[in-house]
Image (cartoon, grey):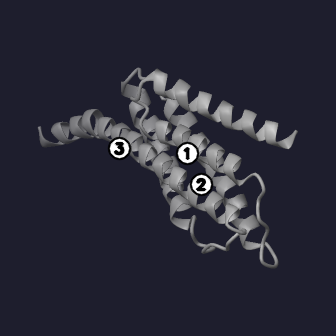
């Protein structure tokens, strides 16, 4: 009876918790990604100020843990539930791509020689940064309404138009 109970708990309850934990962790990662992106862009816009080279290490480590947890969720929950896990995988892949871009940004910032440069399109880049941050934060809270998602895309589109106008 004890072994059977333990088996049922491990098969029926743990995977549900693992999926919920992964969703919560991905929401935290998107919020962290938004903060890190804002920090990197702020450093870029303030004469390409150097940042701590280990700034992203914890973020990368957490994403690796999330990937391992995702594989566990797939391995256990796919057998029992008919839930579509593709959105979780897509969100995780998006975070992995974002982390690679953040690393490139950090590397570029820390390899600027000299004092750095004043960016003449600073207001436009700050607006784009804010719009991208909004989009990342919406990924952190996927239960937000679709209207808010459209508003952040509209804001990003408007920022891109302003930047293009400034260039011409």
The residue wearing badge 3 is 21
* Residue 50 picture quarter: bottom right
Q: What element carries label 1?
A: helix
* Of labels 2 and 3, the one closer to you: 2
Asked if marks 3 and 1 touch (Cβ < 8 Å), the reply is no
Report how far apart the C-alphas of labels 3 and 1 lie in the structure: 23 Å
Question: How many residues crowd mark 3 within 10 Å: few (<14), some (14–19), many (20+)?
Answer: some
Report how far apart the C-alphas of labels 1 and 2 lie in the structure: 7 Å
Residue at (64% x, 57% y) in the render: 41
First of labels 3, 1 by sequence position: 3
Rendering coords of residue 24 (x, y %): 37, 43
Asked if marks 2 and 3 touch (Cβ < 8 Å), the reply is no
The answer to whether one can see residue 86 in this image is no
Judged from this view, the residue extending furthest toward the right is 168
The answer to whether one can see residue 65 in this image is yes
- Relative horizontal placement of residue 113, taking residue 103 as reference (left or right): right
- Relative horizontal placement of residue 21, taking residue 51 as reference (left or right): left
The residue wearing badge 1 is 133
First of labels 1, 2 by sequence position: 2
Q: What element carries label 3?
A: helix
The residue wearing badge 2 is 37
Asked if marks 1 and 2 touch (Cβ < 8 Å), the reply is yes
Rendering coords of residue 7 (x, y %): 24, 38
């Amino acid at each position: 009876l004890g072994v059977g109970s333990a088996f049922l708990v491990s098969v029926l309850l743990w995977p549900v918790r693992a999926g919920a934990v992964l969703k919560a962790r991905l929401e935290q990662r998107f919020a962290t990604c938004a903060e890190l992106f804002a920090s990197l862009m702020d450093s870029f816009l303030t004469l390409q100020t150097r940042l701590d080279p280990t700034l992203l290490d914890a973020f990368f480590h957490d994403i690796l843990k999330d990937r391992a947890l995702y594989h566990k969720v797939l391995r256990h929950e796919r057998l029992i539930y008919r839930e579509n896990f593709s959105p979780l995988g897509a969100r995780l892949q998006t975070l992995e791509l974002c982390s690679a871009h953040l690393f490139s940004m950090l590397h570029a910032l820390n390899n600027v020689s000299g004092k750095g440069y004043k960016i003449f399109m600073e207001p436009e880049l700050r607006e784009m940064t804010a719009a991208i941050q909004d989009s990342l934060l919406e990924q952190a809270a996927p239960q937000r309404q679709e209207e808010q998602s459209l508003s952040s895309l509209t804001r990003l589109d408007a920022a891109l138009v302003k930047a293009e106008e400034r260039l011409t």
